Image (cartoon, rainbow, N blue to C red):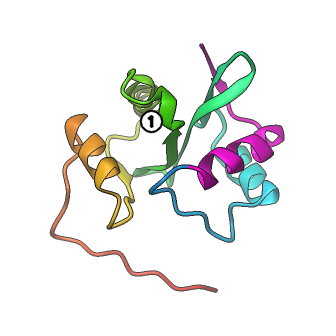
Amino acid sequence: MIIREMNPDDWSKVISLWQNTEGIGIGRSDTKEGLEKFLNRNKGMSFVCEIDGKIIATIMCGHDGRRGFIYHLAVAENFRLQGIGKCLVEKVLQELKNQGIHKCHIFVMKNNEKGKSFWSKIGFQKRDDIEVFSIDI
């Protein structure tokens, strides 16, 4: 198992994993160009996990200078419950800490019960004091 920094050339493999992972929402910015912009803006903060050259897990992370944000943590179903997701989360949280960021958020789809359970188990707390508002531009 190898964990390495994600790069734009991984796009076709990571989008395939995301499309086949329950609870992952794919948006119009999840293009190869969108991935490249995100990775360039947040260097050294997004990773893939490979086994025998096949990407079996991903995590994307970035920050705005104050708060960190995690996107697209995905682990292929037959590799779950082995600590891979937790390892990836710990890696990005350490990188956020190294960059002086002390709080991190994750957006979880409302119907993603497995995801909510995972995030709770590793110490993230569900917030009831805020709601997310979005606008397409």
Please identify the dominant SS of the magenta region: helix
Could you say whether the residue bearing mark 1 is in a helix, strand or loop?
helix
Left or right of 30 in this view: 130: left
- Nearest the viewer among 22 and 120 is 22
Q: Is residue 65 above or below residue 77?
A: below
Name the quarter where the C terminus is drawn.
Answer: bottom right
State whether residue 69 is above or below residue 107: above
Where are the magenta residues, as a range? 1-20
Which quarter of the rendering shows the N terminus? top right
Determine crowd level at label 1: few under 14, some 14-19, many 20+ residues with C-alpha closer than 10 A: many
Q: Nearer the viewer, residue 22 or 11?
A: 22
How many marks can you see?
Answer: 1
Q: Where is residue 28 shown, x and y percent of the image?
A: 68, 71
Q: Is residue 13 magenta?
A: yes
- In this view, the residue farthest toward the front is 78
Q: Is residue 116 above or below residue 31?
A: above
What residue is rendered at 39% in x and 59% in y?
107
Whether 83 is drawn above or below 71: the answer is above
The residue that appears at 49% across and 43% down in the rendered structure is: 73
Residue at image point 77% right, 50% down: 36
* Amino acid marked by disc 1: Leu
Instruction: Spot the residue most to the left.
Output: 128
Q: Which residue is mark 1?
A: 96
